[in-house]
Amino acid sequence: MEQIEIGIIGGSGLYDMADVTDRRDVTLRTPFGDPSGPYVIGTLRGRRVAFLARHGAGHRLSPSELNFRANIFGMKTLGVEYILSASAVGSLKQEYKPLDIVFPDQFIDRTWGRVSTFFGRGLVAHVGFAHPFCRILSGIAHESGQQSGATVHRGGTYVCMEGPQFSTLAESNLYRSWGADIIGMTNLQEAKLAREAEICYTTIALVTDYDCWHPEHDSVTVDLVIANLTQNAKTAQRIIAGAVERLPFDRTCECATALKYALITRPDAIPDAVRRDLAPLVGKYLQTT
């Protein structure tokens, strides 16, 4: 199978990358089930990429229904080392206006019931996650954003909520009191799993609304979100294409070796089935001499 180094995950409003050429669909099965849909393999700015529509064809999967493990494991199976993930978010600060773009550097987890790890079933691993986004990849994406003509912001805390409902006013004000910057429903699990898969990961957060805390935006509607996303989609594609053009880089970041000291289970105690299923992630660390 052809090895594809660069993965792109498109969220609400970004269901395709128009500039990807020589495209073909690749359908993968993983030990964790089916990804959201086929990976579109093609060429973007001279680089081979794999694009995945996070919510599936026709936006049929809600945030709580997404098979995050299959989506990221599929990327790993393809050989991906860098993931650029686009996502719609609400703003929790006045200065982050609708149609702005944020490159966050932290998370707060407000999800429940989602599986956020590849490990368990007899193999335990604890990866470092203090800095959940790849600093180098985030810097490259931010530079591309600056050149896109959009208003961009580097850094900030992304609250990942369960959804699919939007926040209550009390919740929105609580997150603002915590100093959080933006709120979305999808990116935390992707980032955790990408770290376990030793893939560099960053988010391009597309601000669609002020969430419900703002006196002029107390009722977030899908119509408002979609209208702003449609306008932001072309900008997001330019930012992603510009970042892809700057890849790859020398992976001296913590992402590249996240599992090196994370596996805690004694090798001879790991079940054969788990060892086999997770070979793309852990095989190099479990080789016998």
Image (cartoon, grey):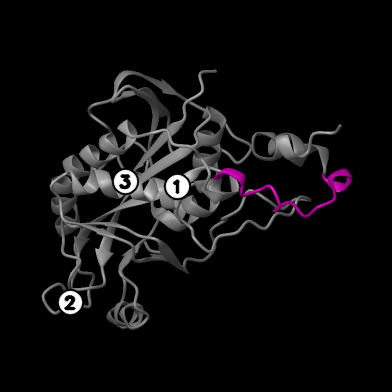
Position of residue 6 measured from the top left corner of the image (x, y, whole percent): 42, 33
Q: Which residues are magenta?
A: 256-270
Please indicate whether residue 195 sits to the left or right of residue 279 in the image: left
Q: Tag 2, which secondary structure?
A: loop
Amino acid on which the number 3 mark rests in the picture: Ala
Q: Which residue is mark 1?
A: 201
Instruction: Indicate which disc residue 141 carries.
Output: 3
Question: In this view, which residue lies farthest toward the right?
Answer: 268
- 173 over 62 or under it: above or below: below
Give residue 85's quadrant in the image. top left
Q: Is residue 11 visible?
A: no
- Which quarter of the rendered picture does the N terminus lie within? top right
- Magenta-span inclusion, residue 258: yes
Q: Tag 1, which secondary structure?
A: strand
- Which quarter of the rendered picture does the C terminus lie within? top right
Position of residue 262 measured from the top left corner of the image (x, y, whole percent): 70, 53
- Magenta-span inclusion, residue 189: no
Q: Residues within 10 Å of mark 2 (few under 14, many from 20)?
A: some
Q: Which residue is mark 2?
A: 214
